[in-house]
Amino acid sequence: MRFHSDNTATVCPELLEAIRNANVGLAAAYGDDEWTQRLDGAFCELFGTEVRAFVVSTGTAANALALATLSPPYGAIFAHEAAHIVHDECGAPEFFSGGARVTIVPGAHGKLTVDALRSALDATPPSVHTLQPAAVSLTQATELGTVYRPAELRGICDLVHERGMRVHMDGARFANAVAMLGCHPSELTWRAGIDVLSFGATKNGALADDFLYRRKRAGQLVSKSRYLGAQMLAYLDGDRWLAMARHANRMADWLAQAIGRLGGVRLPLPVQANEVFAIVPRTLDECWRARGARYLEWPGEGPGTDAVGEDERFIRLVTSFQTTEADVQALVGAADASPAA
Amino acid sequence: MRFHSDNTATVCPELLEAIRNANVGLAAAYGDDEWTQRLDGAFCELFGTEVRAFVVSTGTAANALALATLSPPYGAIFAHEAAHIVHDECGAPEFFSGGARVTIVPGAHGKLTVDALRSALDATPPSVHTLQPAAVSLTQATELGTVYRPAELRGICDLVHERGMRVHMDGARFANAVAMLGCHPSELTWRAGIDVLSFGATKNGALADDFLYRRKRAGQLVSKSRYLGAQMLAYLDGDRWLAMARHANRMADWLAQAIGRLGGVRLPLPVQANEVFAIVPRTLDECWRARGARYLEWPGEGPGTDAVGEDERFIRLVTSFQTTEADVQALVGAADASPAA
Amino acid sequence: MRFHSDNTATVCPELLEAIRNANVGLAAAYGDDEWTQRLDGAFCELFGTEVRAFVVSTGTAANALALATLSPPYGAIFAHEAAHIVHDECGAPEFFSGGARVTIVPGAHGKLTVDALRSALDATPPSVHTLQPAAVSLTQATELGTVYRPAELRGICDLVHERGMRVHMDGARFANAVAMLGCHPSELTWRAGIDVLSFGATKNGALADDFLYRRKRAGQLVSKSRYLGAQMLAYLDGDRWLAMARHANRMADWLAQAIGRLGGVRLPLPVQANEVFAIVPRTLDECWRARGARYLEWPGEGPGTDAVGEDERFIRLVTSFQTTEADVQALVGAADASPAA
Amino acid sequence: MRFHSDNTATVCPELLEAIRNANVGLAAAYGDDEWTQRLDGAFCELFGTEVRAFVVSTGTAANALALATLSPPYGAIFAHEAAHIVHDECGAPEFFSGGARVTIVPGAHGKLTVDALRSALDATPPSVHTLQPAAVSLTQATELGTVYRPAELRGICDLVHERGMRVHMDGARFANAVAMLGCHPSELTWRAGIDVLSFGATKNGALADDFLYRRKRAGQLVSKSRYLGAQMLAYLDGDRWLAMARHANRMADWLAQAIGRLGGVRLPLPVQANEVFAIVPRTLDECWRARGARYLEWPGEGPGTDAVGEDERFIRLVTSFQTTEADVQALVGAADASPAA
């Protein structure tokens, strides 16, 4: 009953197999190996256009390097108030960019809208005294488990480009969004106007040189890079990335339906990816935890009109490619002993 | 009828006289001249305690250097949403600190409160993933022309120190606050718990070395510093700084009363320093501008419940040591021809 | 016949095995897993004192994070002119520290000496106008394949500490140095006065908090960190790290003796670790490359009095735990057809 | 007998007069006043081409802002080992650029040469692992009182531009160089290929926007900027800047001839601007200091083959627009009592 985070899962066996297969003979270091060299091609095929892929060791590094490439040190980067770059990167965007500021934009369900973004941009008219609007960063799927549709992305990108700015997509759960919408990856990225995607791949060739040097000086150019390249290739191979995301989404859907039927449980957010947010009776929360379930209590007062009551808890449950039906049934079963159920 | 900003006024004649008097003979450079050397003493006397004074060329530099001394590069600096460091310094705090983030706190009348600050601090529980709460910056008098009383400052400083953080005061209008409250400068600074004041003077001796090197590498250690030192000494001499502020405050008070009597004019904020905020009929605004009055239209929708109507304008009028009764009467007189008056 | 770099070797099978063993069940993310937790203990045992270990993804990140912890942004970091942080990190030390400067110190055989360091330090007397001397970084084994003995390290550390500065050791080839000297790891680190070692381990507990946040904001806090922890544990287990280094050193020694007997080959540097520098006839170099040997041509004119002639090449050959006697014999055999041999 | 530094002189009376004249009426802040607005025109006329002028408060800020505009954060900036940006700016170039590195180039008489620069550039072949060569900074007149001729500048600029880099001139003593050579200011700047001059004026319009925001966030956009603008206009008016420099140069020339005739005094460097370097008997140095002369002892062992003996001192004497013949005669007269004279 581990629904804490996708980061607690293991690595899928095929990736380990890929590492083992790459562990033969000598290979050029720092990205000149054959595995890394094949990455650009694999991503071009995946996205149906020319892209450049840069492998780094963490999502924080990917986001921060991308934003540093899009914003001058005196730039403003607009992001949703729930964004990972706002809460969970210890100032990496500021660090990598040399001092750009992350400006917060509100929005329901973890999503930016054209109107909210326009208001935020209009609130800082051009002046030498303010930070210069440079980029917008949005997350797909969002930190609240919701998904932007292609038309929503196009609307945002059009506005941002009109203002001479650029758009970064934090694709930490990009696979879950593609799996949910059933569309082609290009429809959620370059065809919608996204300039850089933190999947490791950048659409905009002109930015690649800057990225190259920034990655190195950030200590993110790995010497034995074949092991990263091999993993990434195995991840893309046969659409494994998508199959894994589809499974996680299906489990989240199932989990939502199952706990939604429990007494006193409310689901304040649509479940569109691999995250289920729930407001549950305090007693149920305690019962679950006592029986070993692992998940996060979510900070804040509940989204929109769904305020969390005094005897309630706002929680987040995350599924992964390893979550099984048995995990879900165990959680539901564990609720039986709860007074509220 | 110039009420645009205190920055449009001239320098008072006594300061020019001081520069002329300093312009005799050779003097050691980079702060080793007698004028600069006397500054520490003058500020110690003014504040009634040991302080170190560092002269820099702009308020932006003073604020940013102070904050860089108080916050690590991975620190969070909390400030009111109307703060100068938020809107008008083009990212200087981020730049000087190496990437610290300015986190916005809401509050009526341009002021931080203990409750609002506690909520903001509690919203980011300690974690390696977030920026580390390091400092609070407040402005005295505030950007909205209001003033913190000593007890308010003590409450804020106590909370901040309990959390192991430090307090910076942007004293751009410190003189106006002292003049308004009639208290000793120490009651608004170190006795209340302020760690660093951007008046050029720092209370906390332990920070001085860091400040010294940061000032130099920021290009703020002026070689012929006697001219800055001499001006600052003349500014402090015989409480000239306070007399100038008292005059500006009195003119603002008078101005508020005078325009407050005009038809359709509302004063949504208390007038406690040298700034008057007013919601005026659009026709009056046009009439004033047509007759040469100069002042700023303030962005936003009006504070608190005082929403700005469609046929209204939200404006800011600033007085200085040079504002005369005649200036105020001219503005009131200019309103006579306005249809709304 | 691959003697290009240690980075071209594979990972040893025991490390892959360790990864596979860690790939079972769920584990807490971001370093709270059991593997990472055991690391501190393993390093404490290895060094015979209290240490903190931080795993990062590259040597460049390890060096730059360590130096940022030792130097303020206005600090000077002294290093040998051949140091990796000088030539091969694309400005990472400057980036991570927020602008500290790497100051170059000359020295024979890739090594700093007490005298050269004292001259460099004395050349910049304390002044607010200069960068403040903050740290010395030395590499063990050096970039030229030589090794500092404990007494040499103590001399340098004593001088540096007298000046109120601190010492960083880039331990990229630390294992080779321990293997060569046959001494305890502590004699080359904390007992000699080293403050921080880029092996992932820091001796100085007081610096650990700063390191923690800097690592996160540098995008170096890996989420599924158990895989890094497991590798590192396997690397330390049963002194595997030392056995691997001993083998590489022995191969380098053998290689040096073998090619030193070839006609026209000079060895201008002592061979003390896993690097062999040689000045070879141009014809031999061409012959070797034609037959598939891989190694680096070293920039510069040759160390000390060993100038490189017009018909000569200055090359570097590196051995690893995978280098075999057959590799060495193949290289020597390939020289037979060379006109010079 | 003050020959310590040009910074110890007063401001010339005409500049104070200009400040007084600007101190009338209200004026727009932050550079929108008429004085600052006229500056661009005045500099265009002076240099005979389109330029943009940005006034800042110190030479350190001017240099660091210019270099930050020319170099990315992962750039290398090449400068002479005696350069002000190397020794006397406490890391400002690194700070303003976000981590670029100042790389030292040797050269006789304080000057860069095409050959020395080419060697330095060739020593760091292009690679993702090294800092990217971005700019060269040279000082005119140099820190050792020598002057680059137009042809020398053209040679350097041609080489730098071939490499895709740009040239910055630290014009701290630019006036002395123009006065010495008797040529048009354009011949020493844009006609020779200089991209940016730290006189406050930049030739390259494309860089101006970046400079604008960087200046603001560095706390260098002064609010009451009319006082800076008025001073600069008075400085340019009627070629006052040049007349002042001519006088200082003439005094330096005279001083050099006068002390060159004293027993035991050697002049190891050509005197081309307002600095005189001399190796003098220790007894003469002591005698001068005892009689109140003020000047700097210069660090180092003497330039070129002129090693400083045990009983000698290497000193620097600087003249300014205020130095008089009487000052020079007083120094020479003070030498009479010296045992060595």
Image: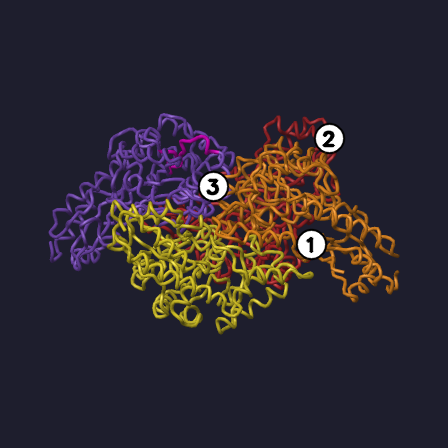
Chain colours: A orange, B red, C yellow, D purple
Q: Name the residue under label 3.
A: B11
The mark lying in front, picked from 2 and 3, is 2
Q: Which amino acid does label 2 sit on?
A: Asp
The mark lying in front, picked from 1 and 3, is 1
Which chain contains the residue that carries disc 3?
B
Residue B210 appearing in the image: no
Q: Name the residue under label 1.
A: A6
Which chain contains the residue that carries disc 2?
B
Residue B72 location (% of width, % of height):
53, 56
Q: Do the residues labelled 1 and 2 touch (CB within 8 Å)?
A: no
Mark 3 is surrounded, within 10 Å at the Cα level, by few (under 14), some (14 to 19) or many (20 or more) other residues, namely: some
Secondary structure state at the residue bearing disc 3: loop
Q: Which residue is drawn at 67% across and 34% down?
A: A192
Q: What residue type is labelled 3?
A: Val
* Distance of label 1 from label 3 (alpha carbons): 62 Å
Q: Which amino acid does label 1 sit on?
A: Asp
* Figure quadrant of residue A188: top right
B314 with respect to C184 (left or right): right
Mark 2 is surrounded, within 10 Å at the Cα level, by few (under 14), some (14 to 19) or many (20 or more) other residues, namely: few
Start-end of magenta stretch: D194-208
Nearer-N-terminus badge (2/3): 3
The C terminus of chain D is located in which quarter?
A: bottom left
Residue D67 location (% of width, % of height):
41, 41
Q: Does mark 2 fall on the same chain as mark 1?
A: no
Q: What label sits on residue A307 in the rendered view?
A: none
